Amino acid sequence: MEMVVLALFIPACFALNMAPGPNNLIALSNAKRYGFRIAFFAGLGRLTAFALMIALAASGLAVVLHTSETLFLIIKIFGAAYLFWLAIQLWRAGAPADTELRAQQLANVPLLMRQEFLLAAGNPKAILIFTAFLPQFISPTGNIELQFGILGGLFLILEWTAIACYALAGVYLASWFSHPRYRQRFNRGCAGLLASAGIGMLVSGKGS
C-alpha cells in the first residue's frame, strides 16, 4: 500500500474515531464511574464489533446491508432502542461512593464490554464507514483483502487510541465531579445526549 494513501487515511480516520458519538460518550461515562483501566478494556467490546464489520465489508456482505432498506431500518431501530434503554439506565443511576465503585469494577467489565459491543453493532453509521469510507482508500488493482486488513487494522488501533483519550477525559471528570450531586447531574446529562443520539439515529437517512 502506498504511503501517500496512508498519509491521507490516518488523519481522516482518526477524525472519525475522535468524533463525539454514543460509544465515545459511554467510554467517557464509564471512565468517570469506574476508572481508566475498566473503560479502556471495556472498549474491546466495541473493537470486536468493528472488527466483524470490517470482515463483512471485506467480503462484500456489508454492501448488501447498506443497499437493503429493510435491513438498514432494522439495524437503525435496534440501535436507537438500545440508546434509549442506556439513557434510561443512566438517568436512573445513583451516585455511589468511590469505595462502592472500586468494589464493582471487576464484576462490571464483561457487562461494559457487552454494552460497548451492542452499541457499536447497533449503529448504522458504522456500516456506512466501512462501506463508503474505507473503500475510498482501496486500490481495485491491488489485493483488496490485504488492503482491507491493513486499513481495518489501522482503524482499530486509532479507535482504541480514541477510547483512551475519552477515558482519560472521564478520569479528569471523576475528580472534577467529586460531589455525588454533580456526578448525578453528569449522568443525567449523558443520558440526555444518548437519548438525543437515539432520536438522531431514527430520523437520519442512509446518506446522512
Image: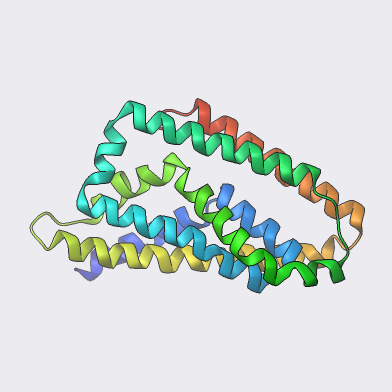
- The answer, for residue 35, to whether it is visible in the render is no
| Horizontal relation, residue 115 to residue 150: left or right | right
Point 65% across, 69% down: residue: 38
Decide: is 88 above or below 40. Answer: above
| Horizontal relation, residue 31 to residue 56: left or right | right
Front residue (pair 103, 188): 103
Point 33% across, 49% down: residue: 130
Q: Where is residue 190 in the image (x, y as percent from the top left)?
A: 71, 46
Decide: is 105 above or below 28. Answer: below
- The colouring scheme, among rainbow, by chain, secondary structure or one colour, is rainbow
| Horizontal relation, residue 188 to residue 200: left or right | right
Decide: is 167 above or below 57. Answer: below
Q: Position of residue 47 (x, y in %)?
A: 45, 62
The C terminus is located in which quarter?
top left
- Residue extending furthest toward the front: 107
| Horizontal relation, residue 192 to residue 13: left or right | right
The N terminus is located in which quarter?
bottom left
Point 80% across, 66% down: residue: 101
- The answer, for residue 186, to whether it is visible in the render is yes
Q: Position of residue 25 (x, y in %)?
A: 63, 52
